[in-house]
Amino acid sequence: MGVLLLVRHGQASFGSDDYDVLSDTGQEQARLLGKHLAGHGVTPDVVVRGDMRRHRETADGMLEGGGWATSVEIDPGWDEFDHLGVVAAHPDLVAATDDRRAFQRAFEEATARWASGADDAAYPEPWSGFVGRVRDALERACAQAGPGGTAVVVTSGGPIAVAAAALVDPPVDGGGDAATTARLWSRFNTVVVNSSYSRVVVGSTGPRLLTFNEHAHLDGETLTYR
């Protein structure tokens, strides 16, 4: 049985000129995660990351903390959706993005409209396209975990939420309809902790979500959601 760990990146730099850079807290979260996993006997056969700076910096910190010399592969299928573009597609919400709480409210309302699929033409990447590419990336990562292997994916909250929704309500089982996927995604996406990991087991009957959003390596100021 293979094991796949889906890791959310460490805290990024909200409000800075470049959001895609990890904050000091984000750097520490990544190192703590690697140390924690190594202390629990995890040695990945492969590390896969999205093609964003925060993914790279998290993977680097995790490898440092774990003392691993594991190869790292890039799969853009694990990239986050363009959250700023999704919010900007709704000018009535843009004025509410001056602080973290206001942005969170605007973000949740804008992503709900995006995930409804009602106006796909308004977005560079429609909701259906995002879901499709993440499901494809999940399939590739599960294959890399293979029989008896361990694969670690470093990605973002949005893709992890899509993967969790697909595993809880698999399309092949007659589930996975658009409305259910969007509802599950919203529930998962709003609670994913920075540098948390979700554990997927890959066996003869396919992948199964074993745990979601584990973050025992964090406490106090290192426990963040945004």
Image: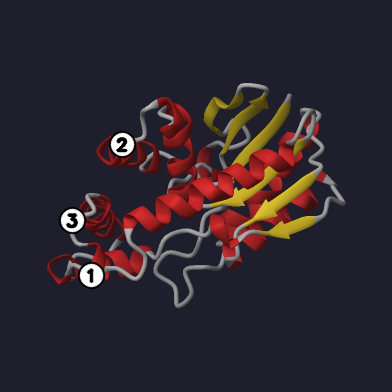
At label 2, the amino acid type is: Asp
Q: Where is residue 100 in the image (x, y as percent from the top left)?
A: 31, 58
SS at circle 1: loop
The residue pinned by badge 2 equals 177
The alpha-carbon separation of the residues under discs 2 and 1 comes to 25 Å
Q: Position of residue 5 (x, y in %)?
A: 64, 37
Asked if the residue at tag 3 contacts the one at tag 2, i.e. Cβ–Cβ closer than 8 Å, the answer is: no
The residue pinned by badge 1 equals 89
Q: Between residues 19 and 77, which one lies in front from this camera angle?
A: 77
Q: Residue furthest left?
A: 92
The alpha-carbon separation of the residues under discs 1 and 3 comes to 13 Å
Asked if the residue at tag 1 contacts the one at tag 2, i.e. Cβ–Cβ closer than 8 Å, the answer is: no
Q: Is residue 139 left or right of residue 148?
A: left
Q: Where is residue 197 in the image (x, y as percent from the top left)?
A: 59, 37
The residue pinned by badge 3 equals 118
Q: Between residues 147 and 161, which one lies in front from this camera angle?
A: 147
Q: Which residue appears at 42% of the width and 60% of the height?
A: 81
